[in-house]
Amino acid sequence: MFEQNSMKSNVIILTSGLTGSSVLTGLISEAGYWTGDRTVKKKAYDTFENEELVRLNQRIFEAADFKEDYLTHFSPAALARIDSLSRKVDLSEFQAFVEKCNQHDPWIWKDPRLWMTVHFWKDVVDLRSCKFIVLTRDFRQLWVSTILRRQIISYRASRGYEEHVRNSALEFLDRNRLPHLLIRYEDVVVRPGPTITRLNDYLGSELTLNDLKKIYHKPLYKLPASSPIDLAKALLIYAKNYSQRIDAPSSNGSS
């Protein structure tokens, strides 16, 4: 059981792409967490990503000279550059953004870039006012979803990248002694009751199953990409585009 406070902490979600983080963020926002003046919208859904946060995260990448695909490439060298970046750039714009968010607290940040850029934000945000959620996904589910979106990557590379992201996020949180909750996306949609209870215990919120149904419009209690048809489609797409696949990311990358 987690300690509950009368004042809600802000929430930062650390995750890779295609892990269902929009569903989780949308669910938590139902408890009154501010997602921003405008959020990034995609064709089929709201990502609940603060547009200004996404823009500033991209600025951090540019300042750190990180030009790789952040959705597939793990680079310790880039993380090291981001970690020291706050001593080299003008922080005023970033500080102004944090002050704006604090005027709307409790707020929630979600952006797949955050597992990297949190190494910069640690010097701008009072992380002690935040609670962290590390969101992961079943490796096969993640691979199938990635391929169905025509992002051609081997299962080995997809799994390796996801493990790097999870381990990097957990190491950062442990090193800085920051509270965090580890959640699998499959548990949100297949075991929503116990998962919502865990969230409520951690955040001090009163989320319900009806809150999840407002955000997630597919059948609950069922894996989202579990049918033999989904797997067959993914295998066919991967086979047809095999020569275009992304090589397994290296944990010793220099970019």
Image: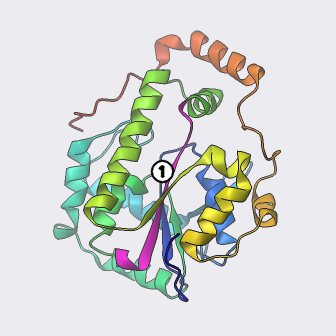
Q: Residues within 10 Å of mark 1 (few under 14, many from 20)?
A: many
Residue sitting at x 77%, y 39%: 222
Image location (x, y in percent) of residue 213: 81, 59
Scheme by which the image is coloured: rainbow
Front in this rendered view, residue 39 or 19: 19
Front in this rendered view, residue 67 or 118: 118
Q: Quadrant of the C terminus?
A: top left
The magenta region covers: 127-139
- The answer to whether residue 167 shows anywhere in this view is yes
Image location (x, y in percent) of residue 96: 39, 82
Helix, strand, or loop for circle 1?
loop
Image location (x, y in percent) of residue 105: 53, 83
Residue sitting at x 52%, y 44%: 17
Extreme residue toward the front, this view: 1
Front in this rendered view, residue 121 or 128: 128
In the picture, measured across the screen, residue 91 lies left or right of residue 214, that is left
Residue sitting at x 66%, y 64%: 197
Instruction: Identify the residue under disc 1.
Output: 15
In the picture, measured across the screen, residue 242 lies left or right of residue 72, that is right
- The answer to whether residue 39 shows anywhere in this view is no
In the picture, measured across the screen, residue 186 lies left or right of residue 203, that is right
Residue 63, located in which quarter of the rendered image? bottom left
Q: Does residue 188 sit above or below 85 in this rendering? A: above
Residue 108 among those drawn in magenta: no
Residue sitting at x 41%, y 80%: 129
Q: Does residue 140 sit above or below 69 in this rendering? A: above
Amino acid tagged 1: Thr
Residue 57, located in which quarter of the rendered image? bottom left
Residue 67, located in which quarter of the rendered image? top left
